[in-house]
Every structure is written in C-alpha cells, then in structure tokens.
Image (cartoon, helix red, strand yellow):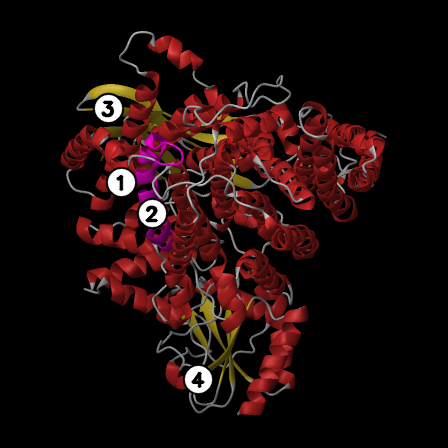
Amino acid sequence: MKRVLFLLPLVLAVVIGGFALWGLSGGRDPAQIPSALISKPVPDVTLPPIEGIATPGLSKADLQGQGLTLVNVFASWCGPCRAEHPILTRMTAEQDLRIVAINYKDKPEAAVAWLEELGNPYELIGSDYSGRGGIEWGVTGVPETFIVSNDGIVLYRFPGPVVGDGQRRFQDALDAARAAE
Amino acid sequence: MKRILLSLILLASPVFAVEPDEVLDDPVLEERARVISAEVRCVVCQNEPIDSSNAGVARDLRIIIRERLVAGDTNEEVFEYLVLRYGDFVLFNPPWKPSTYALWLGPFVILIFGFGAVVLTLTRKKAVPAATLSAAEQEELEKLRSDRS
Amino acid sequence: MIPELGQFALALALMAALVQSLLPIIGATRGDRTWMESAQTTAVVQALLVAFAFGALMHAYIISDFTVLNVVENSHSLKPMLYKVAGTWGNHEGSLLLWVLILALFGAAVAVFASNIPLALKARTLSVQAWISVGFLSFLILTSNPFERVFPPPLDGQDLNPLLQDFGLAIHPPLLYIGYVGFSIVFSFAVAALIEGRVDPAWARWVRPWTLAAWTSLTGGIALGSWWAYYELGWGGWWFWDPVENVSFMPWLAGTALLHSAIVTEKRDTFKAWTILLAILTFSLSLLGTFIVRSGLLTSVHAFAVDPERGVYILGLLAVSILGSLALFAWRAPAMESGGLFAPISREAGLLINNLLIATACATVLFGTLYPLFLEAITNEKISVGPPFFNASFIPITLPLIIVMGIGPHLSWKRADLPGVLARLKWLAVIVLLATLVILWIANGGPLLAVISMGIAVWLIGATLQDWARRAKLFQPGAWARIRRQPRASHGMTMAHLGLGVLMMGAIGSSAWKSDTVAFAEKGTIVPIAGFEIIFEGIEQVRGPNYIAQVASLKVTQDGEYITNLYPERRVYPVAGSTTTESDIRQTLAGDLYVSIAEPASEDAAGLWTLRLIYEPLVNFLWIGSVMLVLGGALSLSDRRLRVGAPRRAVPTNATPAE
C-alpha cells in the first residue's frame, strides 16, 4: 500500500507527460476552435446581394436541395482571401462544384472591384456588411469555407485560406463529404 | 514569429475595451452586460474575454449581448445564444455537464484524498506509544546533530 | 569575434558540466575525495564560462552588433540603453541563456559557500545540478543558438517589442528565473539525499537557505510581472488565471509548502518523504512552466516565442528529470523512517494542514490549467477554463488556510493547548467581527464573500501581530532587547504572514469594489468616477526617442477642488509598427485612479478620444504586501543560523521560538 502511494506522483507525471506529448504532435493549433455548427442545419439568415453586381443574395433556402455546396466567407480587405481565390475558382470549376459566398464586413464598391479584378466564381453572394451574418455562421475570421450537404446540413468548416497544406486537408474533407452524399 | 508579434499587438490594446457608444443607458442592464462579457472568451484572441478585446468580432458580440439583454433575455439565454454559434469554448466558466464533471469535482476529490492522508498520518502517529526521549537520549541526539552540521 | 567566443564558451561549459555530472558522484560512491572535490572546480568554471557567454551576448546588444541574428530580431540602435541590455533576455534564446546562467550560478554558489555540508552530499548534489545543466546547455547549443550570425548584416534591428520596453519587465524575467531555477538546487539536494538514502534535520537545514532564496525571488518575480501587467497593459487588471500566470504560481505554491514542510523536517525530524517530494515537485513545476510557456501547448494572453519542435526537446528533458527523480522517489522514499511524534493538535499538525491546503490549491490550479488539454485529447472537445473556475475552487481552499495561518504560529511543537490558544485569541475574534461589520457598512453592499474575506485578512494580520507581541512580551520591560535577541527567521515569518494579509486586502479591494467608466472625450468633456471629476483638457503630440505619442491632459478634481493632472498616452512605434497605451495613474493608499486613452473603434466618433477610467480601491496594498513577503523572506535569509557559510553553531533545541 505504502509503495503504491509513493508511486502515485510518478504515475501522475507520466499521464501528464503523455497528454503533453499528444498536445505537441500532429500539427495541433491550440488557438483553433471547432465549429459549433457541424451536423446542424445552416443558420437561418438571409443576406442581400452586393450592390452593383448581378449575383443574387444568399438565404437558407438557397442551400437546401441544391447539391453539395461550398460557402466561402471572404472580404476584399483580407490578404489570404486573395491567395485562396484562384485555387477555389479552379477547384470548383474542375470538380463541377457549386460555390456561394458571404462577403464579410466589406464595402460594396470594394467587393465589386475585387470580384471584377479576380473573377467571380460564386453563384450567389450574400453581403454581410454588419458582420451579423458571420456571427450566425460562427465565423471567427476571414477566410473561412464551409461544406454544406444537399439537405442544408453543415458538414465541415475550414478556417483560414485553402492553400498549400490547407488545400490538401480541405480536398480530403470534400472527398469524404461527397462519398457520404 | 509573426503570429506572436501579432498577438502581442492585440494584447497591447487596453483590456476593458468597451466603447462609449456600446454602453447601455440602463445601468442595471449595462452591469449585466459587463458581467456576461467578462465571462465570454474572444474567439480570435489568445485568451481574453470579449470585454477586454479590441477585435472586431469581440465588439460585435458585445453589442449583440446588449441587444439581447434589451430584448429581455436572461443571462442564461444570452450564454446559450453564444454557445449555439461558437460552442462551449467561448465560456470561461465551463458548464456543468458530463465532460466537465471531472473538472468541477476534481478539487473536491483532491481535497478529500489529501484529508484522508492527513487523518491517516495523525492517527497512525497516535497508535505508536508516545515516545519521549530520556534526558540522556536527548543529549546524545543533540550531540549527533551538532556533529553533522 | 566576441559572439564566436561566447558560443565557444558555451561548448566548454557543456564539457565542464559533463565532467561535473559524472566525476563527483562516482567519487562519492567510491569514497574518492579528489573526485568529489573536483565538483567545486567544475561548478565554478562552468558558471564562469556561461557568464562569459551571457556577457558576450549582452555586449552584442549594447554595441548593437547587427551581425548577430538575435540582436537584429530583438533590438534597434535607437533603443534606450537600459532596454538594449534588457533585450538580452527579452527573447527565447537569450532568456534560455539566462536560465542556464542562473542554474550554473546556483551550482557555483553551493560549491563555494556551502562549506558546512558533508563532502559526499555536496558532490552528489553538484552532480545532479550538472545533469540539469547538461540538458539545458545542449538544448541551447543544439536548438537555440543565441550567437547565430546573419550575412549580410542589416542596417538596423527590428526593435524589441515596445510593450516590453519597460523597467518592471526588464527586471521581471531575471527575478522570476532566479526563483524558478533557484529551486533546481533544492531539487538537486533532494535527489542527492534520495541517492544517499538519508534525510535528517541537518539536511533540511542545509537546504533551507536555498529554498528561501529561491522562494523570495520567485515572489518578487511574480509580483513584478503582475505589477507590469497592471500599469503597462492598460487594463487595470493584475491577475487573470492565464496559463502562463498559473505556471509561475504553481511553483510558488509548492515552494511555499516546501518552506513550511522543511521546517518540520528540520525541527522535528519528520515529514521527510513529503519534504523530498515537495522539493522535487517544486522544481518540476518550474520546468513544466518553462515548457508550457515556450511550447505553445496552451493558448495564453502572454504570448512568447512558441515553437512546438523545441517543445518536444524540452518535454524530453522534463521526462528524464521529472520521471527519473520521481522514480527514484518511489524506490527510495518508502524506506525513510519518520522521526518526531506529535499530537493531532500541535504545531506539526498545523503545518500539516497548511501543507494539505496549499498542495490542494496547487493541484487544483494544475488540474484546471491542463483540463482543456485532457478533454481535447480524449473527446476532441474544446472548452475554456477561466477565472470563474479558479475563483470558485481556489478561494474556498485558501480562506480556511488563512484562518489556520492565524492560529498556527500560536501552537507549540509536539502537543499544543488548543483551548488555551483559542482563549488567547478570543478578543481578537471579537475585534475581527467588529471590523468586518465596519467593512460591511463602508462597502455599502458589494459581494458578501469579499466582506468575509476582508474580515479573514484582518484576522490574519491581528493574529500574527498578537503572536509576535506575545513572543516579545511587548508590554513588559526589556521588550526591545528580546525582539533583538529573537532569531531573524522568526521576525521574517511575522513579516511574511503580515504581508500576505495586506496583499489579500489589496486583492479583495481591487477586484470586488473596482469601478470603471468609459466615455468619448474632446476638449472640455467632464466624466465623473468614484467621487472624482475628470476634465479632458486636450491632446498634444510629443516625440520620444523611438516613438511618437499623443498625450492627453486630464484635470482631476474632487467636489470642485483641484487634485492633480494626469497624462495618459497613446504611443506609436514606427519601427516595430505597433502602438501601446501608456496609462497614467494617481496612486494613493486608498486606491488608484487609472486613466487611459484610445482611438474610438467606431467611425462615427472620428475626432473624439475614447477615455477609460478605472478606480481600484486598495490596489496598492497588493504591492505593499508583496514587498513585505519579499522582505520577510530576505529577513529570514539573513538569520545568522541560516547564513550560508556561517560559522558552526550548536543546533538550536526544540525550544527555539516559533518561525
């Protein structure tokens, strides 16, 4: 009994060490938080179109029964968005994917100019000037990209730009989502 | 390195970041809003409550909290609203649920365990016959001690 | 050239440490005097070499040698000299070098000053200390070379973070490290004792000054860090239960428990295994702190240069030292016989309860800090454990501790007369009750827990003073002579306990009765707070050495009478590309009036300033209490019975006054 008691500190230290080792491995980012929306229906928000562009706005109904859809949150003031834009554009064109967008806290003129310069792959764009739509979606920053199922269920959320290693991880999630549909 | 710098810059901005135009006229509601926002973790910062963060999302959330309070929500309803969108992560005060039972009960378990050990020590001592050293033994002990030091 | 010499010195220091980690301990086993004595030389040589390396890095900072990458990344030629010097340890590599320097200095101090310790114990201790040195020196040399060159050298540096350009923060890391790392020598003593298989009162007494020295610096280091956060970060807070704060607090708690447990081992020859365990755990928690701060395992508001790869290396070092020592403990400690016996009501029992509560508090902080990691690993769920949890668990554990703290020093060793002691304290209890009612009346509401805690703080102060007065027989002739005759260590205890009471008052006052307000201000705006009126008189642009500041001029009046002027600033550092808030504070014993300015977030308020005002009652009691804690530690350390290298004196008998 006494021996066991004296072993206790060692055992506890080993346990804590094990957790610490786990915490350092596998590219874990402690600041990254999981989305609370996974496996839940998309939030019920209706966003108007951006002024000065023909693309219509975005509402919950637009994400139901229209097949697998990517929802990209972007802003013209966001550098990484510019980096991921051509990749997303190519990805959706090549894989015949539907992509819609939420334009987060952006002035309409700036957003229009940005889309004119870089191209507009989006079927629908909801303008979220106040940022309230973003909060309904649990957005923590731009860019973020969601994968929404045919039934309007949020399957996956990818925070940060879909480039490099992120693109690979995003593609994996996308393939898994497709397989499940 | 950039991330570190960035976070330090964020940190440079004053905590208690409420802006004058956010403050509610009703002091009771405002006080509740402050209490709530001190317990809500900013989702883009390092480990700060939204009450003290200058991040845009933190400001939006502070305003939303006030709107909901004005609309008549209880504090619990406001927290629930936030958890639905951002998960339990935003609560600095972890909720009481199966995955946090261990957290909340932990300190008690530690205390009871320690208390048991103390009681054990004290009673075991009692069982041993009271050992008072004879004067000669005491003297010898003192001698031994001073020899060593 | 000098940087290369510094790097070379580090390599030589590693060699010295390697020799020191083997020769003396083998010598101790074989009974070879020469081998054992080699530790004295290697320890001093190692310290000199590391000191040279540290001096070389500091030199590079002072002359702004921009061929050294570390200097480029963390300094700038325009920076004030003090912060150039402080820049040496204001970064990962430099601070690690400082860490190793303190480690080596403690080893050398034991080698030089601890002449009263048996040679074998000393040899083993220094070898263990060298094991730690080998680990951290190799870590420094292999992964974090502070002397790395850059070619071609840039014209100027990238500047040290302006937030860190602050006097308090310049000296905070060295103090904190002396505390953190100082516990290494206690750890080495403990491991050496385990290897020898012998712990006795003499051992406890040799270790005590080192524990005290480390504890005193750690107390000062934490207090300084807290003070810095209070006035530099501009939010009027001083503690947030952030992981980085917690990991510095845990060694302090464990060290405090150790300090008290070691007294029992010294006076009564008991609690041996527990004292050894605490000695190991205190340093282990310091190591854990170093690891958590640098690995980025947990998110913290006090960001540091985090790097998971380095984290793995440190984790390896931790595994070897902590697991190794705890395994040794599990193997050798059960054989340690307990000595002195005591009744359930006695000084020993009081200290046992003290240790139980402090250890529980420490374990709770550890558990709460790591729980999000545990949960994430098991269920992939992310939660936050913040101030509400720590306040709810830590406060109920510490309040009883403080109550017992008032009684403990009144108890005598072996068997105490509790009814007698309580009878002695009954008038004090009445006074405390009355004081609590007065506080309740003054506070006019506020959280009841705060009022009760305030009463408990008054109790601690009163009971400590009464104990001191009783021992000195203050109201009888010859009191002064008696006070002077009493050991300094016992006065140190009184001072430290009083300090904790004062600190508690500051902590309670500034968190429970704090008030704050915020307003848009322009010339002529008047904002009331806590009975003051603040008048915004305008803003002026001022140029500093490496920044541009907007300085607001605020007039403070109370009931129309002029009190003072305050000048909070908003600084822009063009080189670092960042801004800081320099708050201004009117400090009085009653409370601080804390003002800061910022640019409004809303576009509608362009041209106005956001004026933030905080009133923190009693906050200065925090710093006064901290100073008293440090003074108490220093006073005990100056006790001639403990002074390192002091001439031999007879061991005091058990009749020694309380401490």
- Amino acid type assigned to the residue bearing label 1 in the image: Ser
Say if residue C594 shows up in the picture.
no
Q: Which mark is residue A153?
A: 4
Q: Position of residue A174 (x, y in %)?
A: 58, 82
- Separation of residues labelled 3 and 2 (CA atoms): 37 Å
Q: Secondary structure at mark 2?
A: helix
Q: Which residue is mark 2?
A: C395
Give the alpha-carbon distance from disc 4 to disc 2, as whole Å: 44 Å
Left or right relative to C74: residue A122: left
Task: Confirm whether the magenta stretch covers residue C389.
Answer: yes
Pinpoint the chain carrying mark 2: C
Q: Position of residue A127 (x, y in %)?
A: 42, 70
Question: Residue beneath label 3, please?
Answer: C557
Q: Nearer the viewer, mark 4 or mark 1?
A: 1
Task: Report, in whole angstroms, how far the alpha carbon at label 4 lies from the one at label 1.
Answer: 51 Å
Q: Are marks 4 and 1 on the same chain?
A: no
Query: Are discs 1 and 2 located on one and the same chain?
Result: yes
Q: Residue at x 79, y 42 (%)?
A: C29
Q: CA distance from mark 3 to mark 4?
A: 60 Å
Seen from the viewer's position, the closer of residues A31 and C297 is: C297
Q: Are marks 1 and 2 in contact (CB under 8 Å)?
A: yes
Q: Chain of mark 1?
A: C
Residue C211 placement, left or right of C506? right
**Mark 3 residue element:** strand
